[in-house]
Amino acid sequence: METITCNGSGDSSAIFYLMGIPSLPKCLFLPIFFVFLLLYMLILMGNALILAAVVAKPSLHKPMYFFLINLSTLDILVTTTTVPKMLSLFLLGDRFLSFPACFLQMYLFHSFSCSEAFILVVMAYDCYVAICRPLHYPVLMTPQTNAVLATSAWLTALLLHIPAVVQTSQMAFDSIARIYHCFCDHLAVVQASCSDTTPQTLMGFCIAMVVSFLPLLLVLLSYAHILTSVLRINSQEGRSKTFSTCSSHLLVVGTYYSSIALAYVAYRADLNVVFAILTPVLNPVIYTLRNKDVKAAITKIAYVTI
């Protein structure tokens, strides 16, 4: 039986070896590389177009679109944190990550993902004010308020994960620690440790509950009020027109939490990769197809470019 000798706690000489998706045959690595590369390029181009459209068109300088460019920025950052390393793994077999690189990737991935959840809550609040309190909208959703809400979402997420990352970095690891994942996800890194994993697994679970279910609860609460207000409108056309203003956001929320359920309820590397890519690639599609203002702005940019 092989004996595993751990380094001391917090020994930064440990090297992490990404196992990738163990069930994936090696003959599929190259096709998967091209699929991921295509999706990554779509994410970059789609979200960059949304950023350009909102910044360039004055009619889109509204709270809803201000939060949308925050979401698009986060989509780019989340995927850029993980996908390039995955591409290198599938094309070149580059599986190694240094201790600092692994923990930096872990911190950034979870922080940016958490920021997305908080931005979705802020967008739900924006929809609530627009539909349920339309007369107060200009007073409640001022540029200063919008900046505070967005900054709070970013800062809270960036600070929230520091304790878990620091404490995980103090665990003992083998000189070459095997991570059964395509990137340094928190739970995968904890499971690679030689230390007792129970405290960190529990901490990770608690943080996941806070950053997943609490934002979801707030979003559902907002939409409960929105639905109540919409149902009070007498005409079917009026109800449809009012609710359509938030339909894109509702679809994005559904996609986001569906991918989380796939990734974490049945924790598997392949499903977790779906979470890392699915939402960022679908968000631009949803907002481009369902929002006529964004669609018109992007079409104009594409026409001018051509």
Image (spheres, rainbow, N blue to C red):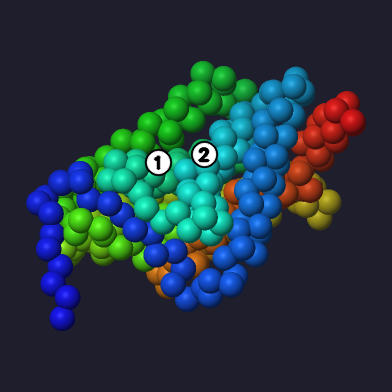
**Residue at the image point whose x is 16% and y is 53% from the top:** 171
Q: Is residue 283 placed above or below 177 in the rendered structure?
A: above
- Disc 1 marks which amino acid? Leu
Is 207 positioned to the left or the right of 118 in the image? Answer: left
Q: Is residue 126 visible?
A: no
**Residue at the image point whose x is 20% and y is 46% from the top:** 13
Q: Nearer the viewer, residue 216 or 11?
A: 11
Q: Position of residue 108 (x, y in %)?
A: 40, 41
The crowd level at tag 1 (other Cα within 10 Å; few <14, some 14-19, many 20+) is some
- Disc 2 marks which amino acid? Leu
Q: Is residue 9 placed above or below 122 in the rendered structure?
A: below
Q: Position of residue 162 (x, y in %)?
A: 27, 40
Q: Give the CA distance from mark 2 to mark 1.
A: 8 Å
Is 172 positioned to the left or the right of 229 in the image? Answer: left
- The image's mark for residue 265 is none
Q: Is residue 141 visible?
A: yes
- The image's mark for residue 108 is 1
Q: Quadrant of the N terminus?
A: bottom left
**Residue at the image point whose x is 74% and y is 29% from the top:** 53
Look at mark 2 in the image and give the residue it sits on. 77
Residue farthest bottom in this picture: 1
Q: Position of residue 67 (x, y in %)?
A: 58, 33
**What SS does tag 1 mark?**
helix
The crowd level at tag 2 (other Cα within 10 Å; few <14, some 14-19, many 20+) is some
Q: Position of residue 122 (x, y in %)?
A: 51, 38
The tag earlier along the polypeptide, 2 or 1, is: 2
Mark 2–mark 1 CB contact (< 8 Å): yes
